Amino acid sequence: MSTWHDYFKEQGHAPDWPYPVRYDQEQEIDADVLVIGGGIAGCWAAISAAKQGLNVALVEKGDTIRSGAGGPGCDHWCNAPANPLSNVDPDEWAEHMADRPYCNGIGLQIQCRENYDCLLELEQMGGKVRDTGDDYLGAEGRDEKTKIMFSPRYTRVHSYLASAETDEDKMKFYQADHTRNNVVIRVWGSTFKPALKKECQRLGVRIFDRVAVTSLLTENGVQGARVVGATGLNNRTGEFMIFKSKSAILATAGAGSIWLISTELGGYSNMMSRTITGDGTVMAWKAGAELTTMEAAGVLRIATGHKHKWYTGAGDASYENVPIVDANGKRVPYPTQGWADWGAMMPVPDVEQAIRKGILSGEYALPFYGDFPSMPEVERNATWKLMLGEESTTKIIIDTFNKAGYDQSRDLLQSYKFIEGSSLPQWREAGYGGGVIVDWNLKTTLDGLYAAGMQMFSPEDHSYAAATGRYAGRKAAAYAREVGESKISREQVILEKARVYAPVKRSSGMEWKELHAGIARAMQYYVSEFKTESLLNMGLDTLRKIEEESVPQLFALDPHKLMRSLEDLSLLTYAQIIIHASLARKASSVPLNFQRIDYPTLDPPEWRKFLTIKQENSKVKTGELPLTFWGNMKEQYEAHNKDYTGVYKGK
């Protein structure tokens, strides 16, 4: 049958659950290194640890072959200055990338030093990273000798724009030809995840797909103690999983859908995978790990049910180089060969405002279009087939257009910028700022627990997840070699088991979507664009009321809905953490997109710091760290990686 409606008309009832249900049954697994999350960072961590000869278990909520934010693919391998054709020094580039507040200098240094090594290793596994078929001969940025495709969009623009004094100077910049830094490589990212899973299997990594990890186990069950394992739920059979390990690596990314849920009408309301629901951050929080930048949030912009993927036209990464024209065919001055700053998804505000004024005055007619036909054929194909065809959030769009008869050599492509309006202030996402604090070994503040990729505070992109996952794997393996055995607290297991199965012990009540909607509405009302002490406390009270009155009504009819229910409980705790962090920051901040009406001063010097938050004896405790608490990036990296060998040997 093609739809649920057809099935019900034919059968008259829902299908039976297709797997044996084994609630309360337990399975115990021992491992040296436990990797929680099978996305890009998790797979790399498992591979890296397994290469050290250790017993590795990888646990993934979905299917590792395509799971995670980068599972379907990626089109750019960013910040790879260690490649031999780079025009910048890796250590200098890392410093350049870290020249902004609330970034993660540790992760950026690792990315810039090691992610080209990752790419070469990935190529040996079967990932495609070069134009070996000569499909894009003559494309700008293609190195004819190595057949590596460098992105022509990325230029070293930061210093230029800092010195530009007028709008005219900045506009001229976008038409200029600048020396390429060659730090971003175009790749065939859809080949990566299958290659990573295959390599995990080749190395003997035990993969537990369709298992959602629900909690971390600590020594003697004590909050803040060494992490010695985890619990999980098989979301097909309902079986309870108990993992014992010497070290564990969290790689479950951040959280989505804190402010929104609209699966029926608006599509999924977050750019990231539906399975990314803050589980890892919440289990780290409950175990006593320290978090930071949890107050950061942003307004939804692209790739959701509320916003189209092609949001900014040529300013959107995958649509690089596409000229923008208005409804009359007049060229619109969007940047096509370089962004205004590191990773901004929009042109500089001056350009944005100039275009808006042009629309209001009649200079430009809406809607705008991507002028694919005007591009050289090889550039058009590189954008349409390679960039858009390999990126996880655009591949399905391209496939749909192709099936509908779209011809990029003939047809314009409508951009929804300006005509779809701005996102409402309450349509927000947690952003990618909040996460666990790590040191130069990517160890969290808990012994035995490491983190990688978007699980860390202030993470970056696909290659960042790969490099930090690979790095965390070898560090966690080194720890596992040195540490002794530990004992899991049976009492802690019993308490978690009771929490996990509570929804299936009920036969009626509230299902997961209703609970999720209530959490989202509370965040929209009380933790939106503007914040005050009173509003935030009202939000906290509302979430506590949901916890006390609605959670005891939560019920699930099958293991899948049980998993969704547990995700809601993670979202509920994650939302509370956001509010606690927001209450702690008594100042407004532009970089954090954080506005407090009762503390309106923007980024006062005394508040330019990381605020930390953790649970200690089940009570919330806040602290602080300086913005560059990691020290000298080059020196610290080299001090912690004396035996590492890679392409880049350093100065």
Image (tube, helix red, strand yellow):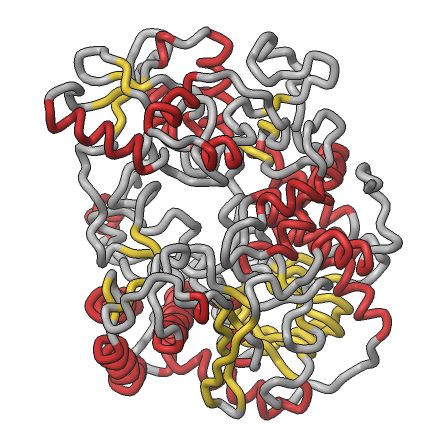
- For the residue pair 573 and 331, the one nearer the viewer reads as 331
Asked whether, in this view, residue 441 is left or right of residue 296, the answer is: right
Asked whether residue 244 appears in the rendered view, the answer is: yes
Asked whether, in this view, residue 304 is left or right of residue 336, the answer is: left
- For the residue pair 39 and 362, the one nearer the viewer reads as 362
Residue drawn at point x = 52 percent, y = 75 percent? 624
Residue drawn at point x = 26 percent, y = 16 percent? 325
- For the residue pair 301 and 85, the one nearer the viewer reads as 85
**Relative to 412, does residue 123 appear above or below in the rendering?**
below
Residue drawn at point x = 62 percent, y = 37 percent? 192
Q: Position of residue 440 (x, y in %)?
A: 71, 62
Asked whether residue 523 appears in the rendered view, the answer is: no
Q: Quadrant of the C terminus?
A: top right
Asked whether, in this view, residue 594 is left or right of residue 20, the answer is: left
* Residue 333: quadrant of the picture: top left
Q: Quadrant of the N terminus?
A: top left
- For the residue pair 496 and 341, the one nearer the viewer reads as 341
Q: Position of residue 27 (x, y in %)?
A: 63, 74
**Relative to 57, does residue 100 appear above or below in the rendering?**
above
* Residue 388: quadrant of the picture: top left
**Relative to 221, does residue 300 appear above or below in the rendering?**
above
| Tally of numbered tags | 0
Q: Position of residue 17 (x, y in %)?
A: 40, 61
Asked whether, in this view, residue 574 is left or right of residue 610, the answer is: left
**Relative to 153, does residue 199 appear above or below in the rendering?**
below
Residue drawn at point x = 82 percent, y = 62 percent? 54
